[in-house]
Image: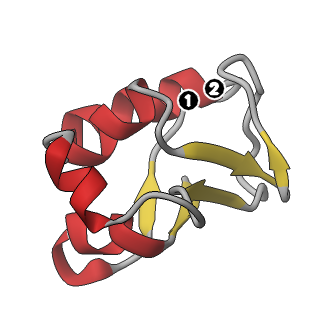
Amino acid sequence: MVKIKLFGVLKTMVPGGKDLEMEIPAGGQVRDLVHSIQGEYPQVGELLDKKKVLVSVNQEIAHWDTVLEEADEIALLPPFAGGSCATWAREGV
């Protein structure tokens, strides 16, 4: 089980605005995590798929083939600067 911290608009896309906990198989990679998120939280998954949200593992930007460990600090990072809520609305988010 890995814990995923959510920031910004992502908290509004998850019921209760809580951080996530997901089951990832041993040797699982960021791509496996993204697929799990897509299944449970399609709006968040879509942003990840379009690379509008970055995945951070242990405070480093992760790649899809980054291997995850249960003790890793995982965060989903939406854009922090530039753009606006109007931009997200225009893009159908």
The three-letter amino acid code for the residue at tag 1 is Pro
Any mark on residue 28, and which?
Answer: 2
Tell me the distance, in whole angstroms, between the alpha carbons under discs 1 and 2.
Answer: 5 Å
Looking at the image, which is closer to me, 26 or 37?
Answer: 37
Q: Secondary structure at mark 2?
A: loop
Query: How many numbered circles does the render carry?
Result: 2
Any mark on residue 53, and which?
Answer: none
The three-letter amino acid code for the residue at tag 2 is Gly
Q: Could you tell me residue 75's position as x and y percent?
A: 62, 59
The quarter of the picture where residue 86 lies is: bottom left
Q: Could you tell me residue 30's position as x and y percent?
A: 62, 30
Observer-side mark, 1 or 2, equals: 2
Classify mark 2: residues with Cα within 10 Å, few (<14), some (14-19) or many (20+).
some
Residue at x 44%, y 58% (from the top left corner)? 83
Q: Is residue 62 above or below residue 71?
A: above
Q: Badge 1 is on which residue?
A: 25
Q: Could you tell me residue 38's position as x and y percent?
A: 28, 34
90 horizontally vs 3: left or right:
left
1 horizontally vs 16: left or right:
right
Is there CB contact under 8 Å for labels 1 and 2?
A: yes
Q: Secondary structure at mark 1?
A: loop
Residue at x 50%, y 24% (from the top left corner)? 32
Q: Is residue 18 visible in this depiction of the protein? A: yes
